[in-house]
Amino acid sequence: MINLDYALAQWSSIPRDGLVPRLSDYLDRADIAIQPWTLIVDMNEKTMPVRLCGTGMVELLGCDFTGRNYLQAVKPEIRQYVIARDRLCVTHPCGLKLTLTASTAGGRMFDDQVLVLPLKRAGGHHSLLRHSAVHPSQDYRDVPISILSYQASTWIDLGDGVPGEAPWADPALRCDETQR
């Protein structure tokens, strides 16, 4: 299990122009202690393809999500909220700490804490870095995994404040706190 505060400090140490580091700079300085528990998800208009699924996540989940649409793992009823919330991480550069509940195909439920941080790509495009604190001693191999809900969300101020209350916000996806 990775320490999400350590992952935030590692992301914060990456050189950058402005508030958000480039994906290439992150990859050049990826920390081997946390990289296995990382997903990098590209933000596109209608999909969120997984660019990279860390080896620890692959082993833990029993499959590699690289190349798949991240949104396929999100319960259909909350996908629009996830897209809007994640888009705010790149349009109003900020981070998120999330607690989510997911289930395996066999119905086993588990909670996970996730740190979400923006990265810039060439051509004005963006990716999201998702560090997971799933516990390696558990077996999640009963795939597919489905994200059912979010219990808590905390915006992380990266230097430009955090988004205000958004009109699309479902109370279950609302960010309750701000970390500075």
Image: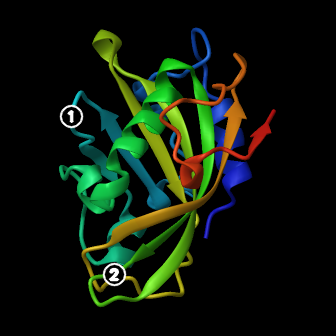
Q: Answer yes or no: do the residues labelled 1 and 2 have beta carbons within 8 Å?
A: no
Q: Position of residue 89 (x, y in %)?
A: 52, 30
Is residue 78 or residue 13 the one in the foreground? 78
Q: Position of residue 71 (x, y in %)?
A: 28, 51
Tell me the residue that label 2 is attached to. 104
Between discs 1 and 2, the one toward the N terminus: 1
For residue 46, the mark is 1
Cα–Cα span, label 1 and label 2: 25 Å
Q: Which element carries disc 1, helix, strand or loop? A: loop
**Going 32% across and 19% down the picture, which residue do you hit?**
125
Neighbor class of circle 2 (other Cα within 10 Å; few <14, some 14-19, many 20+) is some
Indicate left or right for 17 with 76 as reference: right
**Quadrant into which the N terminus falls:** bottom right
One can see residue 27 in this view: no
Is residue 172 or residue 146 the one in the foreground? 172
Q: Is residue 2 above or below residue 176?
A: below
Indicate left or right for 141 with 4 as reference: left
Q: Amino acid at mark 2?
A: Thr
Q: What color scheme is it? A: rainbow
**Quadrant into which the C terminus falls:** top right
